[in-house]
Amino acid sequence: MRPPAILIAAALALGMTACQGGKAQRPACPSGQVCLEYGNESEPLTLDPQTANLVTEGRIIGDLMVGLTTEGPDASPQPGMATSWETSADGLTWTFHLRDSRWSDGAALTADDFVYAYRRILDPKTASIYAYLVTLLKNGQPVNDGKAPLEAVGARALDAHTLQLTLEHPAPYLPQLLMHQSFFPVPRHVIEKLGDAWTKPGNYVSNGAYRLVDWRLGDRVRVARNPAFFDAAHVCVDRIDYFPTADVVSAERRVKRGELDLNTTFQSNRLQHLREVMPGFARPHLTLATFYLSFNTRTVKPLQDKRVRRALSEAIDRDFITQKLQRAGQIPAYSFVPPGVANFAYGARTAWASESFAQRQIEARALLAQAGFSPAHPLKLEIKASSSTETLLLMEAVQADWRAIGVDASIVQNESQVAFAAYRERDFQVGSMIWLADFNDPVTFLGLLKSDTGPQNYGDYKNPAYDALLARADQEPDGLARAQILKRAEQIMLDDEGLAPIAFTVSRSLVNPKISGWVDNPLNVHRARWLCRTP
């Protein structure tokens, strides 16, 4: 997800509780309740599951809402709003049996809420960045293109507690995909009355373990246990405050003082220090995520030249970045799909992966010269990235590597939401990003680069042969054969230098040992319903 996922850091930290006299300052917790103070990197732009984009938004939404399936403690799929399901022999029709449940306002949750949600996210008027995931449903793409009515979407309520989904192609990974926020239900009875205002405190209606209580911009989002949740009796934490923690070092100190119980990131190169001063807190874990650079091939003419893209990519010293700058277990990346992804055949790599860094620098200079760039006429580029200390450190390393081959690169940092808005509008030249798997299958990575994916294909990569292989993989019933097809597709994209993979990343959470139920997992998903805190 869930995000496109980038080295996220963000916004304003106004109103944050400070330490006075060295004593931890926590919001008062009602007597007899369990409260969790949660550092979440950035201010959410929205809590609407069908228009949200960032991982930091998805963390909160995933505590407020539950889909047909949901994440267990280890992020594996388990029954959510659906208690069971059946699949047709051809893999195209899935029938889900819903539990008897209610929204947080007491209204019954029915199969119609799912049908409404899927039509809404595919409606071109919604302009959802994640609509491309839901085009898996029959007629999803023509509906999203405005060429078919909303009623044509392959989602049907057979009765109040039975939902039938018809797919465009077999998708054995569907239970994984249905955990994603793009497939969450939304409360039709509220949205049709209030429109976009439904996500405001006092209006927000949820079906998950928590309900929205308060949202103070730049300060916190507060949620409280939802008594209408189907498993409310087993939810330990009564109240959660999600704080935007743009300054990760400041957040680290707040965790150490006990003002925060956890923070969802720490600066990679501080891992050893953290292990010394806060033993048991740092939780690095290799995750299904890739740090990469996207090249804007739509509007930046030099980047339309494959020789230029190749020169820029091979001139980056990945060993230095991962082993000297980050030092938290990151792995140099010469492909896009990270290790550990299910249903995949590994082996695709950039054509120059086996060359030494010195050889790559020589070749990069020669490629730039062939493309018409020289010391007298240098290539000038702007790198746009999110505002965080770690991102700046990495982009300065890339900037230095490019300077060594004669490229004049400047760095512009924006708050995360601003940077992503620019990426979506193609208001960038080179973008620094991380993509964290939305579900455990290679298409969550390779699908980003399909020509019809939309805004999240930030560099506008397009190759008909690549598209054809992904379409073929969709129709291939044999898992091993499908994996080989996807491997071939990745190799085509890497040969095209469709992006510049830099590192396979690690999740870097700081978790107070008083927190139980936190299970490190490759998707880096930790739903609060599974957590508890001892005094």
Image (spheres, rainbow, N blue to C red):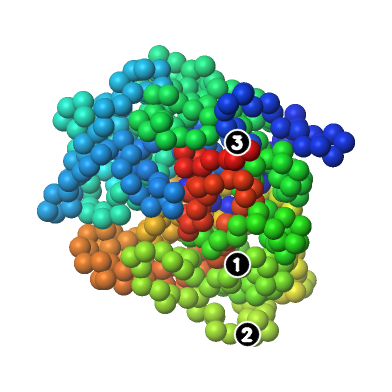
Disc 3 target residue = 36
Q: Position of residue 16 (x, y in %)?
A: 74, 32
Q: Measuring 47% from the left and 38% from the top, which residue is drawn there?
A: 529
Find residue 356 and name its label: 2
Task: Name which residue type carries label 3.
Answer: Leu
Q: Could you tell me how far apart the alpha carbons at marks 1 and 2 are, in whole angstroms?
A: 19 Å
Image-based side of 434 in relation to 368, left or right: left
Tally of numbered tags = 3
Quadrant for residue 308, please give it.
Answer: bottom right
Q: Nearer the viewer, mark 3 or mark 2?
A: 3
Residue lying furthest top: 193
Q: Position of residue 182 (x, y in %)?
A: 40, 40
Q: Measuring 28% from the left and 63% from the top, which residue is drawn there?
A: 473
Closer to the chain start, of discs 1 and 2, is 1
Find residue 26 and name its label: none
Nearer to me, 347 or 233? 233
Image-based side of 273 in relation to 528, left or right: right
Q: Could you tell me how far apart the alpha carbons at marks 1 and 3 are, in whole angstroms?
A: 29 Å
Closer to the chain start, of discs 1 and 3, is 3
* Residue 274 in sight from this viewpoint: yes
Nearer to me, 82 or 259? 259
Closer to the chain start, of discs 3 and 2, is 3
Task: Name which residue type carries label 1.
Answer: Gln
Which element is circle 3 on?
strand
Q: Position of residue 498 (x, y in %)?
A: 50, 64
Disc 1 target residue = 330
Quadrant for residue 379, please give it.
Answer: bottom right
Nearer to me, 94 or 207? 207
